[in-house]
Image (spheres, rainbow, N blue to C red):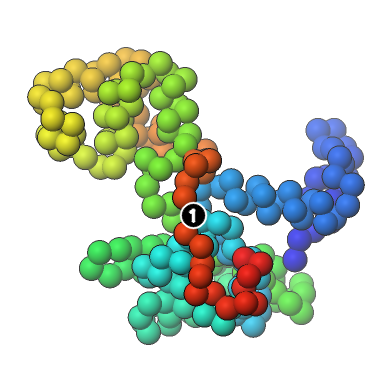
Amino acid sequence: MWQGKETMWGNGGVGCRNDVSTPSMASAMLLRMLDEIDYGVLVIDERGRIQHTNHLARHELASARLVFARASALLGTTPDHSAQIQQGLDLALRGQRKLVLLEDDENELSLAFIPLSHPLETESPTVLVLMQRQSASDNLAVRLFARSKGLSPSEEAVMIGLCRGLGVPDIAREHGVAESTVRSQVKSLREKTGCSSIRKLMQRVNSLPPVVPALRIITPVTHNPADLAHL
């Protein structure tokens, strides 16, 4: 499933390094890299069995909001959701990409099914499943951005409120301050970040790298069978 070091890291040309001595070390490093991305990631084989999940995917499966794992298979919490997942998987195994949108009264989750290999290229095609990021405010890069721009704690809190989709009245009410205070902080935000409008600020924030907070608590997948213990 994972490529050897020369395929992953280049062939020794300009800008490429072959410091990883063995394919197993390269695979371990790649899996660590996946855990640092603020999106749930799963790899599923041609039999529909989950081969790998990063820790955010494990957290999503454990929460069982809209998806969960049973007998190494990715399932939805309703028959309709499971049917959508199966359709996405079937299309990806045939070399097509598919976006699946799952939702109920309280939750929503988008899944991108991406073929990692075309069925004509290998007898064992695999599929990458990418889960949506739940909230831009959970992205560690947002807080790092705030520090790099010298935002005060209150200005950072206002920016995170804007990332959550809150308006000025909502932010003021949440923090127990006057709306005029929040508007003043918004003006300071625009000045410090060099953005002419909140819209441009949100575009800039949404383009930040998806970095996982180091102290995020991950729920263990206690209901997974023993053959998923490595996930």
Q: Residue at x 51, y 67 (%)?
A: 221
What is the secondary structure assignment of the residue under circle 1? Answer: loop
Residue 146 quadrant: top left
Residue 164 quadrant: top left
On the rendered structure, is 77 left or right of 35? Answer: left
Q: From this viewpoint, is residue 137 visible?
A: yes
On the rendered structure, is 68 left or right of 157? Answer: right
Q: Position of residue 133 (x, y in %)?
A: 43, 52
Give the amino acid at mark 1: Ile
Q: Position of residue 137 (x, y in %)?
A: 37, 40
Q: Position of residue 32 (x, y in %)?
A: 67, 49
Q: Give neighbour class at mark 1: few <14, some 14-19, many 20+ (Cα, 10 Å).
A: few
Q: Nearer the viewer, residue 112 or 181?
A: 181
Q: Residue at x 39, y 52 (%)?
A: 134
Residue at image mark 1: 218
On the rendered structure, is 159 left or right of 226? Answer: left
Q: Residue at x 53, y 41 (%)?
A: 214
Q: From this viewpoint, is residue 84 visible?
A: no
Q: Nearer the viewer, residue 1 or 223?
A: 223
Residue 52 quadrant: bottom right
Is 216 located above or below residue 57 in the figure? above
On the rendered structure, is 32 left or right of 100? Answer: right
